[in-house]
Image (cartoon, helix red, strand yellow):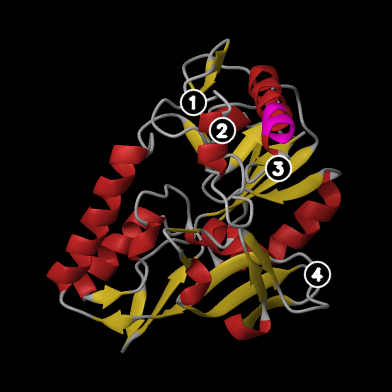
Amino acid sequence: MALSVRQRPLLKELTTLGLGGAALAEAVVRAEADLDELGRFISDSGGRPFVLGGGSNLLAEDHDLDLVLLSVRNAGTPERSGDTLRCGAGTRLPSLLKFCEEAGLSGLEALAGIPGSVGGAVAMNAGSYGTEIKDALARIRLWTPQRGLFWVEARDCSFGYRHFAPPEGTGRPLVWEAEFSLTPAEPGAVRAKVRETLDQKKATQPIAARSAGCVFKNPPGQSAGRLLDEAGFKGKRLGNMGFSELHANFLVNLGGGRSAEALELLENARAVVLERFGTRLELEVIVLS
């Protein structure tokens, strides 16, 4: 299978926030054989490589960007061996949770309502309600142009709040596969826990809106959403971008929004929160500029 390359893809069509101009190119990797061509493609492209994932945590600027997007689409069907589950980085989180429900495997239910891919979730150590993907992660299969494919143990990696770093000396790898150590449970119990998480998020978060999820990290011991709410930013709009009326830490595209509006809103919010509470908010969303 030959590496699939698309020229000048629009980031607004590839991100959940719906913002962004054209990248230089997008390489779609579906099989291990495609990786043999990927290293050469990256070096020949002349652009900055960026692994796209599900596009759910990105704010891309509306002009042309010198990025070469790497999209992993190796979803397939997750493979179960006892309590261990192995899946491709391109697997969407809702599909992974559906498999866990049917297989009776517990440990990933807190990822319900997150629209991204397994690779992106590992790269950002995604989580909610006190649970992170690292809690169930056993091994990760990575790829770099220099080393090709190789496995690393999750315990040898560094994880933090929305942060993942491979073992020292690995470079900046692409996540290809992940292996999880899960707990057997009744399928109905797993399904109920996923549904409970989804219902809770639907009641408090705009999960159906064009959003990039939470835009600011929670400061230690504090809630970014609460700080933004008390600073008057819940429901605040600028043009066609605005903070959600359900959850102040969610920036939503109300239709035809522009990246300049989004960035100005974020800067205004950071300045007001710093002035009122003395707390400097750190971006969780990745800005592509």
The magenta stretch spans residue 88: no
Q: In this picture, is 273 found above or below 133?
A: above
The magenta stretch spans residue 275: yes
Query: Which residue is drawn at the image coordinates 27% and 76% (left, top)?
Result: 105
Query: Which residue is drawn at the image coordinates 59% and 81% (left, top)?
Result: 154
Nearest the viewer among 232 and 75 is 232
Circle 1: residue type:
Lys
The residue tagged 4 is: 171
The magenta region covers 272-276
Q: Position of residue 31 (x, y in %)?
A: 54, 64
Nearest the viewer among 268 and 207 is 268
Q: Main secondary structure of the magenta part?
A: helix
The residue tagged 2 is: 228
Query: Which residue is drawn at the image coordinates 77% and 33% (left, top)?
Result: 289
The residue tagged 1 is: 234
The residue tagged 3 is: 279
Circle 4: residue type:
Gly
**Among the two numbered marks 1 and 4 on one chain, the one whose residue lies closer to the N terminus:** 4
